[in-house]
Image (cartoon, rainbow, N blue to C red):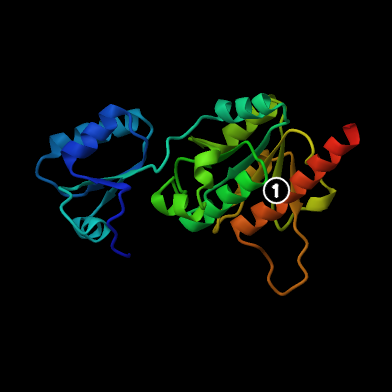
Amino acid sequence: MNKTKSSSYICGRKLVAEALKSGRPINKIYLQNIVQDAASFAAIEFMAKERGIPVVRVDKAWLDKLTEGPHRGVVALASAKEYSDVGDILNCASGRGESPLVVVANEILDPHNLGAVIRNAEAAGAHGVIVPKRNAAGLTDAVAKASAGAIEYIHIARVANISATLRDLKKRGLWIIGADSSGATAYTDCDMSSAVAIVIGGEHEGLGRLVGETCDQTVSIPMRGKTTSLNASAAAAVMLFEALRQRSRKERATL
């Protein structure tokens, strides 16, 4: 693990407790395994769980490497930007008079990969990005930097359950399209000109079984080389700009 002094980290029981009380966006909290003042740690853990913030137990040596300074057994990983909710994303589309174009980034762990996905989404005119609370990168400084500033111009929602969120989007009229190397349909043969959510899988599990089964359609990106797949940000770019091409063509046809 590389040592860091990133401003995304809040160290110490008092500062973390105040951040929780104030409602500051926090991605995750690390608590030291063995401590003397268990009561204060329990209070922090209770507040975190009330807000749905993941709590991870680690040893002191791990925290020492993470922060390079005093942490008193508690470190919070703060968000570089306040999260929106899914309703904000759909309202953004409505406000522009456009059919929703949403990216669902499922379990992308690499912050540079997630930042690039966000950058691609904003550049293609997507209305928002949805990420899971657990097993995924949060909106850290590294993500913000990798997005090249795009994080400031697009809604990003964080949800507890991706499959449940996809089912809710279906009820709201969106067609759910998963990018998967085993998809029987080529992405260019899929209609993305109307209300759609494009699901991009993570580095290790891809879409995952439950998320894949929740999608209305899975599509593949044809490959000719020896490489059998693209990373998440590259796949997102291919899908998003095909959606943009289809939407632009549909707009021209209605003029």
| Residue lying furthest left | 36
Relative to 75, does residue 83 appear above or below in the rendering? above
Q: Which quadrant holds residue 180? A: bottom right
In the depicted view, which residue is nearer to us: 244 or 41? 244
Q: How many marks do you count on the picture?
A: 1
Q: Residue at x 64, y 47 (%)?
A: 123
Q: Where does residue 61 sit, x and y in percent of width and height?
A: 20, 60
Where, quadrant-wise, is the N terminus in this rendering?
A: bottom left
Q: Where does residue 230 sit, x and y in percent of width and height?
A: 65, 62
Q: Residue at x 62, y 50 (%)?
A: 120
| Residue lying furthest front | 255
Q: Residue at x 49, y 55 (%)?
A: 146
Q: Which quadrant holds residue 86? A: top right
Where, quadrant-wise, is the C terminus in this rendering?
A: top right
Q: Where does residue 152 sit, x and y in percent of width and height?
A: 50, 41
Relative to 221, does residue 78 appear above or below in the rendering? above
In the depicted view, which residue is nearer to us: 167 or 193? 193
124 on left or right of 164: right
66 on left or right of 127: left
Q: Residue at x 15, y 35 (%)?
A: 40
Q: Where does residue 212 sit, x and y in percent of width and height?
A: 66, 45
- The amino acid marked with disc number 1 is Leu
Q: Which residue is mark 1?
A: 240
Q: Secondary structure at mark 1?
A: helix
Relative to 103, does residue 179 appear above or below in the rendering? below
Q: Is residue 107 visible?
A: yes
Q: Is residue 210 visible?
A: no
Q: Which quadrant holds residue 53? A: top left
24 on left or right of 176: left
22 on left or right of 223: left
Near mark 1 (Cα within 10 A), the count class, few <14, some 14-19 or many ≥20, is many
